[in-house]
Image: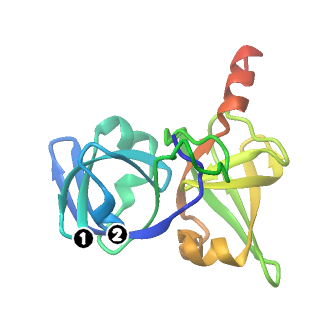
């Protein structure tokens, strides 16, 4: 389980295909604190550390993961939002994030608000957002500003802009979305 509070940006240093799997090697300043079999959220996608070497580590994405995320677009040099799993004795600063990406979305709007930024995303599933509710975009816990069927917007403060990969987004950037788990259960119970 995660909180959606990004610890740092990692960097993809190698991409290796093996059958339908892809092995990603990433560089991170906290690699020395990781262990094999540990879960780490990568742009919101929970992946298991399978190998560690110096300041790099390897994770493997299977076909199911590749089908529901933006990992197929990762290339060497890409900056990835990283978060290690939640410590049970720590403050819970974001919201409940499982690291299970529901779908991808597309950045369809970026508005400079002279001190913050407003990003609008569209998606093609029946998932629901609500204004002032929670959403996870590339692993970042955010509050929904505007909500319509198939789209939503969020506002980003300068700290988040600088310390996540939001500063790399352009119109058309594909992002990983995880909708609020409580909202998903409510929608399921109501038959939506």
The residue lying toward the viewer, choosing from 138 and 56, is 56
Residue at 24% in and 60% down: 57
Name the residue beneath numbered marker 2: 28
Q: At 67% across and 62% down in the image, what residue appears? A: 108
Element assignment for label 1: loop
The outermost residue toward the front is: 89
Q: Residue at x 53, y 70 (%)?
A: 165
Vertical placement of residue 2 versus 164, above or below: above
Q: Are marks 2 and 1 in contact (CB under 8 Å)?
A: yes
Looking at the rendered structure, the secondary structure element under dot 2 is: loop
Counting residues from the start of the chain, the first of labels 2 and 1 encountered is 2
Residue at the spot 60% in from the left edge and 78% down from the top edge: 162
Q: Position of residue 155 (x, y in %)?
A: 77, 65
| Vertical arrangement, residue 72 with respect to residue 29, above or below | above
Give the labeled residue for mark 1.
55
Report, in whole angstroms, how far the alpha carbon at label 2 lies from the one at label 1.
Answer: 6 Å
Q: Position of residue 123 (x, y in %)?
A: 63, 46
Q: Mark 1 packing: few (<14 Cα in 10 Å), some, or many (20+)?
A: few
Q: Classify residue 17 as left or right of residue 39.
A: left
Q: Which mark is residue 20?
A: none
Quarter placement of the C terminus: top right
């Amino acid at each position: 389980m995660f909180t959606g509070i990004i610890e740092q940006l990692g960097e993809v240093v190698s991409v290796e295909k093996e059958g339908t799997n892809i092995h990603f090697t990433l560089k991170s300043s906290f690699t020395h604190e990781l262990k094999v079999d540990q879960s780490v959220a990568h742009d919101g996608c929970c992946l298991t550390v399978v190998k560690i070497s110096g300041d790099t580590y390897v994770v493997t994405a299977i076909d199911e993961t590749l089908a529901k995320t933006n990992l197929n677009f990762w290339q060497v040099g890409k900056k990835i939002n990283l978060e290690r799993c939640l410590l049970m004795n720590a403050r819970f600063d974001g919201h409940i994030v499982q690291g299970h990406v529901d779908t991808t979305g597309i950045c369809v709007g970026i508005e400079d608000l002279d001190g913050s930024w407003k990003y609008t995303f569209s998606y093609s599933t029946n998932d629901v957002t609500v204004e002032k509710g929670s959403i996870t975009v590339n692993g970042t816990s955010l509050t929904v500003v505007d909500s319509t069927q198939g789209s939503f917007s969020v506002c980003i403060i300068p700290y988040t802009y600088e310390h996540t990969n939001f500063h790399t987004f352009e119109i058309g950037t594909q992002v990983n979305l995880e909708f609020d788990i409580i909202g998903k259960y409510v929608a399921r119970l109501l038959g939506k």
